[in-house]
Image: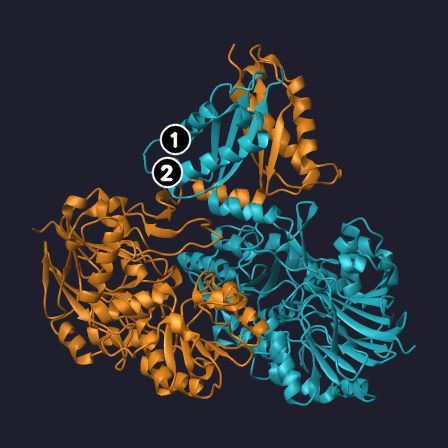
Chain colours: A orange, B cyan
Amino acid sequence: MSSDRLIYLPLGGAGEIGMNCYVYGYGPEGRERLIVVDLGVTFPDMDTSPGVDLILPDIAWLQERKDRIDGIFITHAHEDHVGAVGHLWGRLEADIFARAFTANHARRKLEEHGRDPNVVEVVLPWPEQTKAGPFAVSFLPVSHSVPESSGLVIDTPVGRIVHTGDFKLDETPLVGEPFDPALWSEVAQDGVHALVCDSTNVFSPHPGRSEASVGPAIEKLVAGSTSMFVATTFASNIARVKTMAEAGKRAGRSVCLMGRAMRRMIEAGVEAGVLSDFPTTVPPEDAAQIPRENLMLIVTGSQGERRAASAQLSRGKYMGLTLKEGDLFLFSSKTIPGNEKGVARIINNFSEMGVDVIDDNAGIYHVSGHANRPDLERVHEIMKPRMVIPMHGEHRHLRTHAKLAREKGMGAALAPNGTMLDLTGAAPQVAEYVETGRVYYEGSVYVGALDGVVRDRIRMALNGHILVTAIIDEDGEPLGDPWVELMGLAETGTSNAPLVDVLEADLSQFINRAGRRTLADDDALEAEMKKVARQSASAEIGRKPEVTVVISRLSS
Amino acid sequence: MSSDRLIYLPLGGAGEIGMNCYVYGYGPEGRERLIVVDLGVTFPDMDTSPGVDLILPDIAWLQERKDRIDGIFITHAHEDHVGAVGHLWGRLEADIFARAFTANHARRKLEEHGRDPNVVEVVLPWPEQTKAGPFAVSFLPVSHSVPESSGLVIDTPVGRIVHTGDFKLDETPLVGEPFDPALWSEVAQDGVHALVCDSTNVFSPHPGRSEASVGPAIEKLVAGSTSMFVATTFASNIARVKTMAEAGKRAGRSVCLMGRAMRRMIEAGVEAGVLSDFPTTVPPEDAAQIPRENLMLIVTGSQGERRAASAQLSRGKYMGLTLKEGDLFLFSSKTIPGNEKGVARIINNFSEMGVDVIDDNAGIYHVSGHANRPDLERVHEIMKPRMVIPMHGEHRHLRTHAKLAREKGMGAALAPNGTMLDLTGAAPQVAEYVETGRVYYEGSVYVGALDGVVRDRIRMALNGHILVTAIIDEDGEPLGDPWVELMGLAETGTSNAPLVDVLEADLSQFINRAGRRTLADDDALEAEMKKVARQSASAEIGRKPEVTVVISRLSS
């Protein structure tokens, strides 16, 4: 037993915000029994992942050790924690444990991928425990923006680990369980070996505000509006959707939810019994019949997504409704970095319609679902862990969070994705660096982030694409002239002749002067023709495009 | 004379922040004499303009009327006001008027494009006037972040127009002339017909702060650092570069400027005599010899640009220097929407090196160069114009600025790019909508934004590209099988066979069964093969890629 060790390995979520996936293990080195915490996704962008639908953690390391996995624990029903369950479960095939609302989501994702939803087991919160190999795991209710969000209390032979999941310290969260300091103290009373802790808001210097503070502000805004009132937030922010719906009701409006994701989220909550007190809403198809001054829409698209309800409303008619002068549109949300331009596009469209847009610049119509710096300090204080392992943050968040812990005399380790820590002793040690990364899901296939597929697409986007075809006849001589097609390139360059003509002329000249040895060698011929095409394009348009050469050889 | 009219037409800058280009005209309808204010550029992004180097206003309307242009006036030396001079002057061929520092920039841009720099005439500020057709134009010194920034006082037969250019109300700007309320009152004393006014910061509710407030904060930060201190800002923010250099000097450090754009900007200022008091700096090649605690670098790359000095330092060695634990990096800048991810990448790289990064979240290390809402109100108050025409802003900025003016009883018009206003009467009227837009400069060519070239590149980035070649022999029969090449697509799909093989098999089957009429018709054959390739890809990888088909026909 003396050689047994306790390990921690983030495969996603440490070094980024999103795509959470963490592994804990206990046992002899290389034979540890493992549990997995969360299987989340993150979202692509045009800069780095054009054409990608979804980004998943690379779980090759886990897959090679799937026989050692004693359970998969999902902390809450947000995509960056549960979104990869359908995609990745087949590679791990271990039982999934989650609370009821989260379990519903995980099951639906499995069904969407043709998997048996019964591998998900519903568990009750603390003090209930689930045994998983050497671990006993309990779901600790935390306040966040979605029902039944939980931290995990993981009892190990070395001691207790508290893995917070996403959380904030909200004593009046409206949805989900309030932060209960007594409960947290109870968890901590016999000592916490390691606190593995959300770092998202470590740069926010003031204590976080409660969800309950948002409702009255929105209600006042609705009450002051004499025309249609439309509000958006993340569909997954169930707490906010409820806050807004209640504010609309109190202001005497009919409330209508628009956008598939939002309707589905709320329905799931009602079905799971965690949103039984959600206000009655009118169906979208009836909204157009209601006088605009009596109507409040709650819509998807807080991040400027092109197909969401907010974007559709900003482009014109949607579900029979057209916004106009005097209507009010509220972003009860924060714009995620990278989405600013999409959000601005929608606001400007609304501006053209005469719709007034209110965002959260003033900081009163939105509160974050994550713990701010003083809240993190409070949790450190309650838990008094031997060590703090910051997670759920970019490197700068993890580093700053680790500093915070060290300043208060706790041990801390900075462990970005792939860093395996040995937590057996009094201080965390780096045990190993594991190769990890991202897998892209696009269409119906999975592509490694480093496979070069997306890199080639980015190159075509930046440089354009030239296609060259040439035929070599039975005697090894060029048959006719090379043919050129362009995609994403200017039609004419500096010589004012069509670029296609210039390229074809230069390639003809080359191939007709090429020696027999070059003509006989496909690789050499292709390389030379590529070079000619690139030089020719460079002279004409100042750019070296991507070039694909196809040589067809007639058999003798 | 009764049929003469005064017109205003924004071709860029109204409906966006950047790419400024405005036209004023006076005379009989359709024969107005024209002046142009600013010829600026804006910058591309991966979302909407991958592979583009620079975005210029579409000045086709002006070009068709070039014989009626009596002058081009450039307000200041920022790229979004002067950046297109080299590209577009040849289409307009009118004299350019600017103050000395701005004229230097305009001349360099003309020279870079092989144009005669002598078309730029240096003018003195108010009360000097330049006659240009029916207009008399005077450069009114305003405070902004670059020397000799000016508004234009444009006297017309209808009355005085004040075109503010970019400005803030800074009585201690460190670089350039301070805001002088007496001077502005003097300009306004005989009445202002129209105030055409910067709208950038209309959403900032507090009065703007002076550049002079930044220096002491930075000096304190430098003084508290015991290792290397690196700071970045826009190279074009000459005021800030000077503020930082002086703060570094006062804190006893050797100051070194790094990055070509920054060195060039400061050199130009010194040469033009507007920066004669700029602190002495050490050349970049000597920086590595100076003890790090005595060194302050001022570097390019505040927006996360991949090739700028800040990005290079964040990736490792640059000019013999490597940052390390204990060094401090300051962003004395605001991150422009869309650049957040690039900036975060650099901060995280520095975090991995152990470098502490300070940004302007606290609002003390950066001030804006534009007038905030209370400042705009103050200018309205001083100028008491008959009408306010908001410019330099997205639609939301223009609309909010117009509202502000109307609430104070002034007339106002919302005129996005292409909206020609008739300013002859007491209230602005829309005269006409002019077709306008953007032109992309890439490599060495110009491409219309709606030409489809960039759209094709975006499609390849999102969908990948399939190339199909087929040969039809002298008898009109397929010769061999079609050949497929892929670019930016997964190698295998759901059938686990190589995607190329599946596509070739499906295309072979199609072509070998195709009727003689299809085989004889290139267009029909191409369309059918495209369809087959897309369907086949869709079944395999769940995507319909772009397809280019090349049919080679052997002549009989």
Task: Note whether A42 is above or below B173 in the view shown.
Answer: above
Could you say which is closer to the camera, residue B407 or residue B328?
B407
Q: What is the total number of numbered labels drawn onto the structure image?
A: 2
Amino acid type for the residue under numbered disc 2: Glu
What secondary structure is marked by label 2? Answer: helix
Residue A210 in sight in this render = no
Amino acid type for the residue under numbered disc 1: Val
Task: Note whether A186 is above or below B121 in the view shown.
Answer: below
Classify mark 2: residues with Cα within 10 Å, few (<14), some (14-19) or many (20+). many
Q: Are marks 1 and 2 on the same chain?
A: yes
Residue A463 in picture, x, y percent from top left: 58, 43
Q: Is residue B454 left or right of residue B480?
A: right
Q: Residue at x 43, y 84 (%)?
A: A222
Q: Chain of mark 2?
A: B
Mark nearer the N terminus (1 vs 2): 1
The reply to whether callout 1 and callout 2 are in contact (CB within 8 Å) is yes
Q: Residue at x 36, y 35 (%)?
A: B492
Q: Chain of mark 1?
A: B
User: Residue B502: which disc?
Assistant: 1
Residue B110 in picture, x, y percent from top left: 79, 54
Residue B130 in sight in this render = yes
Could you say which is closer to the camera, residue A55 or residue A486?
A486
Task: Note whether B224 is above or below B373 in the view shown.
Answer: above
Classify mark 1: residues with Cα within 10 Å, few (<14), some (14-19) or many (20+). many
Residue denoted by label 2: B540
Q: Residue at x 18, y 75 (%)?
A: A184
